[in-house]
Amino acid sequence: MTAPVRRVNVLDLAAAKRDRRPITMVTAYDWPTGRLVDGAGIDCVLVGDSVAMVVAGRSSTIPATLEQMIYHGEIVARAASRALVVVDLPFPLQHLGIRTAVESCARLLKETGCQAVKLEGTAGQADVIAGIAAAGIPVMGHVGLRPQAVHQLGGYRMQRNLEQLMNDARAAADAGAFAVLLECIPQEAARQITQAIGVPTIGIGAGPHCDGQVLVLHDLVGLSLDHVPKFVRAYADAKGVIGDGLERWRKDVVDGEFPGPRETLG
Ligand code: KIV
Protein backbone atom coordinates (compact mmCIF):
# COMPACT_ATOMS: atom_id res chain seq x y z
CA MET A 1 0.00 0.00 0.00
CA THR A 2 1.39 3.41 -0.90
CA ALA A 3 1.45 6.04 1.86
CA PRO A 4 -0.66 9.14 1.21
CA VAL A 5 1.36 12.08 -0.12
CA ARG A 6 2.13 14.69 2.55
CA ARG A 7 1.20 18.19 1.45
CA VAL A 8 3.69 21.05 1.76
CA ASN A 9 2.57 23.47 4.49
CA VAL A 10 3.55 26.92 5.72
CA LEU A 11 5.87 25.46 8.38
CA ASP A 12 7.80 23.65 5.64
CA LEU A 13 8.32 26.99 3.90
CA ALA A 14 9.58 28.58 7.13
CA ALA A 15 11.97 25.64 7.55
CA ALA A 16 13.12 26.04 3.95
CA LYS A 17 14.14 29.66 4.67
CA ARG A 18 15.93 28.57 7.84
CA ASP A 19 17.75 25.76 6.00
CA ARG A 20 18.43 27.92 2.92
CA ARG A 21 16.58 25.47 0.67
CA PRO A 22 15.15 27.41 -2.30
CA ILE A 23 11.35 27.43 -2.49
CA THR A 24 9.61 26.92 -5.85
CA MET A 25 6.21 28.26 -6.89
CA VAL A 26 4.52 28.21 -10.31
CA THR A 27 1.06 29.30 -11.41
CA ALA A 28 -1.66 26.92 -12.60
CA TYR A 29 -5.23 27.61 -13.62
CA ASP A 30 -6.88 24.30 -14.53
CA TRP A 31 -6.81 20.51 -14.10
CA PRO A 32 -3.96 19.58 -16.47
CA THR A 33 -1.69 22.45 -15.41
CA GLY A 34 -2.44 21.83 -11.72
CA ARG A 35 -1.56 18.14 -12.15
CA LEU A 36 1.62 18.93 -14.08
CA VAL A 37 2.94 21.58 -11.66
CA ASP A 38 2.14 19.36 -8.65
CA GLY A 39 3.69 16.31 -10.34
CA ALA A 40 6.92 18.22 -11.01
CA GLY A 41 7.54 18.48 -7.26
CA ILE A 42 7.05 22.26 -7.14
CA ASP A 43 6.47 23.41 -3.53
CA CYS A 44 3.55 25.83 -4.14
CA VAL A 45 0.95 26.20 -6.87
CA LEU A 46 -0.33 29.73 -7.29
CA VAL A 47 -3.76 30.22 -8.79
CA GLY A 48 -2.86 33.76 -9.76
CA ASP A 49 -5.20 36.51 -10.86
CA SER A 50 -2.87 36.47 -13.88
CA VAL A 51 -5.54 34.02 -15.10
CA ALA A 52 -7.29 37.12 -16.45
CA MET A 53 -4.34 37.83 -18.76
CA VAL A 54 -2.85 34.40 -19.44
CA VAL A 55 -6.07 32.41 -19.90
CA ALA A 56 -8.71 35.04 -20.67
CA GLY A 57 -6.55 37.37 -22.78
CA ARG A 58 -7.35 40.52 -20.79
CA SER A 59 -4.79 43.35 -20.74
CA SER A 60 -4.46 43.39 -16.93
CA THR A 61 -5.36 41.34 -13.85
CA ILE A 62 -7.92 43.92 -12.71
CA PRO A 63 -10.99 42.20 -14.30
CA ALA A 64 -10.46 38.95 -12.34
CA THR A 65 -13.43 38.36 -10.02
CA LEU A 66 -13.82 36.40 -6.78
CA GLU A 67 -16.14 33.94 -8.56
CA GLN A 68 -13.51 33.32 -11.25
CA MET A 69 -10.77 32.80 -8.65
CA ILE A 70 -13.03 30.33 -6.84
CA TYR A 71 -13.76 28.50 -10.10
CA HIS A 72 -10.10 28.11 -11.06
CA GLY A 73 -8.93 27.65 -7.46
CA GLU A 74 -11.29 24.73 -6.85
CA ILE A 75 -10.05 22.90 -9.95
CA VAL A 76 -6.37 23.39 -9.13
CA ALA A 77 -6.82 22.52 -5.44
CA ARG A 78 -8.37 19.20 -6.50
CA ALA A 79 -5.61 18.60 -9.04
CA ALA A 80 -2.70 19.21 -6.65
CA SER A 81 -2.17 16.61 -3.94
CA ARG A 82 1.31 17.58 -2.70
CA ALA A 83 1.90 21.28 -3.35
CA LEU A 84 0.63 24.08 -1.12
CA VAL A 85 -2.15 25.72 -3.13
CA VAL A 86 -2.32 29.52 -2.88
CA VAL A 87 -5.18 31.49 -4.47
CA ASP A 88 -5.04 35.22 -5.25
CA LEU A 89 -7.50 37.63 -3.69
CA PRO A 90 -8.72 39.67 -6.68
CA PHE A 91 -8.92 43.46 -6.84
CA PRO A 92 -10.25 45.36 -4.89
CA LEU A 93 -11.28 43.08 -2.02
CA GLN A 94 -8.26 43.85 0.19
CA HIS A 95 -9.18 47.54 0.05
CA LEU A 96 -12.77 47.24 1.26
CA GLY A 97 -12.09 46.74 4.94
CA ILE A 98 -11.05 43.85 7.14
CA ARG A 99 -14.50 42.22 7.23
CA THR A 100 -14.85 42.04 3.44
CA ALA A 101 -11.28 40.77 3.08
CA VAL A 102 -11.72 38.06 5.72
CA GLU A 103 -15.08 37.01 4.23
CA SER A 104 -13.58 36.84 0.73
CA CYS A 105 -10.51 34.87 1.85
CA ALA A 106 -12.74 32.51 3.85
CA ARG A 107 -14.77 31.88 0.68
CA LEU A 108 -11.54 31.12 -1.19
CA LEU A 109 -10.50 28.65 1.51
CA LYS A 110 -13.93 27.01 1.97
CA GLU A 111 -15.07 26.86 -1.64
CA THR A 112 -11.78 25.94 -3.36
CA GLY A 113 -10.07 23.70 -0.80
CA CYS A 114 -6.86 25.73 -1.16
CA GLN A 115 -4.49 26.08 1.80
CA ALA A 116 -3.56 29.79 1.57
CA VAL A 117 -4.36 33.11 -0.07
CA LYS A 118 -2.21 35.92 -1.48
CA LEU A 119 -2.97 39.61 -1.65
CA GLU A 120 -1.26 42.62 -3.17
CA GLY A 121 -0.74 45.59 -0.92
CA THR A 122 1.44 48.18 0.73
CA ALA A 123 1.91 48.78 4.45
CA GLY A 124 -1.60 50.27 4.26
CA GLN A 125 -3.03 46.73 4.03
CA ALA A 126 -1.21 45.48 7.16
CA ASP A 127 -4.39 45.56 9.26
CA VAL A 128 -6.17 43.49 6.61
CA ILE A 129 -3.36 40.91 6.60
CA ALA A 130 -3.52 40.81 10.41
CA GLY A 131 -7.29 40.22 10.30
CA ILE A 132 -6.99 37.39 7.78
CA ALA A 133 -4.14 35.76 9.72
CA ALA A 134 -6.13 36.12 12.97
CA ALA A 135 -8.95 34.17 11.30
CA GLY A 136 -6.51 31.27 10.83
CA ILE A 137 -6.10 31.80 7.10
CA PRO A 138 -2.49 31.60 5.89
CA VAL A 139 -1.86 34.76 3.88
CA MET A 140 1.02 35.70 1.59
CA GLY A 141 1.82 39.37 0.98
CA HIS A 142 2.72 40.72 -2.48
CA VAL A 143 4.80 43.91 -2.65
CA GLY A 144 6.90 45.74 -5.25
CA LEU A 145 5.24 45.79 -8.65
CA ARG A 146 1.59 45.22 -7.80
CA PRO A 147 -0.13 44.47 -11.14
CA GLN A 148 -3.56 45.37 -9.70
CA ALA A 149 -2.17 48.93 -9.25
CA VAL A 150 -0.72 49.08 -12.79
CA HIS A 151 -2.49 52.31 -13.69
CA GLN A 152 -1.34 54.06 -10.52
CA LEU A 153 2.24 52.77 -10.97
CA GLY A 154 2.36 54.03 -14.57
CA GLY A 155 2.85 50.60 -16.14
CA TYR A 156 4.53 47.29 -15.45
CA ARG A 157 7.81 48.80 -14.29
CA MET A 158 10.50 47.99 -11.75
CA GLN A 159 9.83 49.45 -8.29
CA ARG A 160 13.01 51.04 -6.90
CA ASN A 161 12.09 52.88 -3.70
CA LEU A 162 14.01 50.75 -1.19
CA GLU A 163 12.57 52.50 1.86
CA GLN A 164 8.99 51.92 0.72
CA LEU A 165 9.69 48.33 -0.38
CA MET A 166 11.31 47.51 2.96
CA ASN A 167 8.45 49.17 4.82
CA ASP A 168 5.77 47.26 2.86
CA ALA A 169 7.51 43.89 3.22
CA ARG A 170 8.18 44.41 6.94
CA ALA A 171 4.57 45.48 7.50
CA ALA A 172 3.26 42.33 5.77
CA ALA A 173 5.58 40.05 7.75
CA ASP A 174 4.88 41.81 11.07
CA ALA A 175 1.12 41.58 10.41
CA GLY A 176 1.33 37.79 10.15
CA ALA A 177 1.96 36.98 6.47
CA PHE A 178 3.64 33.57 6.20
CA ALA A 179 5.63 34.70 3.14
CA VAL A 180 6.05 37.81 1.00
CA LEU A 181 6.17 37.81 -2.80
CA LEU A 182 8.57 40.42 -4.23
CA GLU A 183 7.79 41.40 -7.82
CA CYS A 184 10.10 43.39 -10.10
CA ILE A 185 12.44 45.03 -7.64
CA PRO A 186 16.24 45.47 -7.75
CA GLN A 187 18.18 42.43 -6.57
CA GLU A 188 19.89 44.46 -3.82
CA ALA A 189 16.50 45.50 -2.41
CA ALA A 190 15.37 41.86 -2.50
CA ARG A 191 18.56 40.79 -0.75
CA GLN A 192 18.12 43.33 2.05
CA ILE A 193 14.42 42.51 2.52
CA THR A 194 15.13 38.75 2.54
CA GLN A 195 17.71 39.32 5.28
CA ALA A 196 15.51 41.70 7.25
CA ILE A 197 12.25 39.77 7.51
CA GLY A 198 11.68 36.51 9.31
CA VAL A 199 9.38 34.90 6.72
CA PRO A 200 10.32 33.57 3.27
CA THR A 201 10.51 35.92 0.30
CA ILE A 202 9.47 34.56 -3.09
CA GLY A 203 10.73 36.60 -6.02
CA ILE A 204 9.69 37.22 -9.59
CA GLY A 205 11.95 39.61 -11.43
CA ALA A 206 13.67 40.24 -8.10
CA GLY A 207 17.01 38.47 -8.66
CA PRO A 208 18.65 35.48 -7.01
CA HIS A 209 18.75 36.53 -3.33
CA CYS A 210 15.14 35.66 -2.44
CA ASP A 211 14.23 32.54 -0.45
CA GLY A 212 12.28 31.24 -3.43
CA GLN A 213 11.26 31.92 -7.02
CA VAL A 214 7.91 32.05 -8.78
CA LEU A 215 7.04 32.20 -12.49
CA VAL A 216 3.87 32.21 -14.53
CA LEU A 217 3.54 28.70 -16.01
CA HIS A 218 2.83 29.87 -19.56
CA ASP A 219 6.02 31.99 -19.56
CA LEU A 220 8.07 29.13 -18.08
CA VAL A 221 7.00 26.58 -20.71
CA GLY A 222 6.99 28.94 -23.70
CA LEU A 223 3.22 29.11 -24.11
CA SER A 224 2.77 32.87 -23.71
CA LEU A 225 1.51 34.35 -26.95
CA ASP A 226 2.21 38.01 -26.20
CA HIS A 227 4.96 39.96 -24.41
CA VAL A 228 7.25 37.88 -22.19
CA PRO A 229 9.09 39.82 -19.46
CA LYS A 230 12.90 39.97 -19.54
CA PHE A 231 13.19 38.12 -16.21
CA VAL A 232 11.64 34.95 -17.67
CA ARG A 233 13.61 31.93 -18.88
CA ALA A 234 11.54 29.56 -21.05
CA TYR A 235 12.32 25.90 -20.30
CA ALA A 236 10.19 24.50 -23.12
CA ASP A 237 8.63 25.54 -26.43
CA ALA A 238 5.03 24.57 -25.72
CA LYS A 239 3.77 27.08 -28.29
CA GLY A 240 5.93 25.45 -30.97
CA VAL A 241 4.96 21.90 -29.96
CA ILE A 242 1.22 22.66 -29.91
CA GLY A 243 1.34 24.70 -33.12
CA ASP A 244 3.28 21.97 -34.90
CA GLY A 245 0.84 19.26 -33.73
CA LEU A 246 -2.14 21.28 -34.91
CA GLU A 247 -0.60 21.96 -38.32
CA ARG A 248 0.33 18.31 -38.88
CA TRP A 249 -3.17 17.12 -37.84
CA ARG A 250 -4.85 19.66 -40.13
CA LYS A 251 -2.64 18.55 -43.04
CA ASP A 252 -3.33 14.84 -42.37
CA VAL A 253 -7.10 15.47 -42.38
CA VAL A 254 -6.88 17.50 -45.60
CA ASP A 255 -4.66 14.82 -47.21
CA GLY A 256 -7.01 11.98 -46.14
CA GLU A 257 -4.36 10.51 -43.78
CA PHE A 258 -6.44 10.96 -40.60
CA PRO A 259 -8.21 8.96 -39.32
CA GLY A 260 -6.31 5.87 -40.51
CA PRO A 261 -7.07 2.20 -39.75
CA ARG A 262 -5.61 2.52 -36.19
CA GLU A 263 -7.92 5.37 -35.26
CA THR A 264 -11.01 3.80 -36.88
CA LEU A 265 -13.12 1.85 -34.42
CA GLY A 266 -15.09 -0.45 -36.64
O1 KIV B 1 -1.03 36.41 -10.47
C1 KIV B 1 0.12 35.98 -10.61
O2 KIV B 1 0.38 35.12 -11.45
C2 KIV B 1 1.17 36.55 -9.78
C3 KIV B 1 2.58 36.46 -10.28
C4 KIV B 1 3.45 37.46 -9.61
C5 KIV B 1 3.21 35.14 -10.16
O3 KIV B 1 0.90 37.08 -8.74
Image (tube, rainbow, N blue to C red):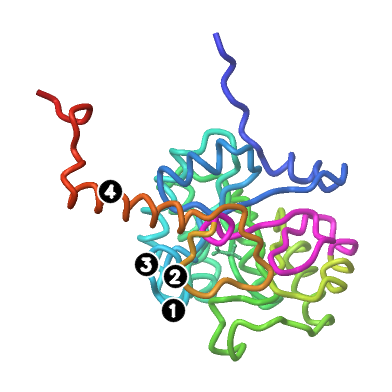
Label 4: state its secondary structure: helix
Which one is earlier in the sequence, the residue at label 4 or at label 3? 3
The residue labelled by disc 2 is 53
Tell me if label 3 and label 1 are in contact, CB under 8 Å. no
Indicate the quadrant where residue 32 lies: top left
Instruction: Identify the amino acid type marked 2.
Output: Met
C-alpha separation, residue under disc 3 versus residue under disc 1: 9 Å
Q: Which residue is mark 4?
A: 249
Q: N-terminal of the two: label 2 or label 1?
A: 2
Q: What is the CA distance from the residue labelled 1 to the residue labelled 4?
A: 31 Å
Q: Can you give x and y, in whole percent of width and height, for residue 48 in the image? A: 52, 60
Q: Which residue is mark 3?
A: 56
Residue 234 quadrant: bottom right
| Viewport quadrant of the N terminus | top right
Identify the residue shown where x is 64% and y is 55%.
133
Q: Which quadrant contains ligand 1?
A: bottom right
- Mark 1 or 4, nearer chain start: 1
The residue under the point 46% across, 57% down is 240
The answer to whether mark 2 and mark 1 are in CB contact below 8 A is yes
What amino acid does circle 4 point to? Trp
Q: Is residue 156 above or below residue 119?
A: below
**Which residue is drawn at the image coordinates 61% and 73% (left, top)?**
229
Q: Secondary structure at mark 1?
A: loop
Verify CB contact (< 8 Å) between mark 2 and mark 3: yes
Q: Position of residue 150 (x, y in %)?
A: 56, 83
Magenta stretch: residue 200 in it?
yes
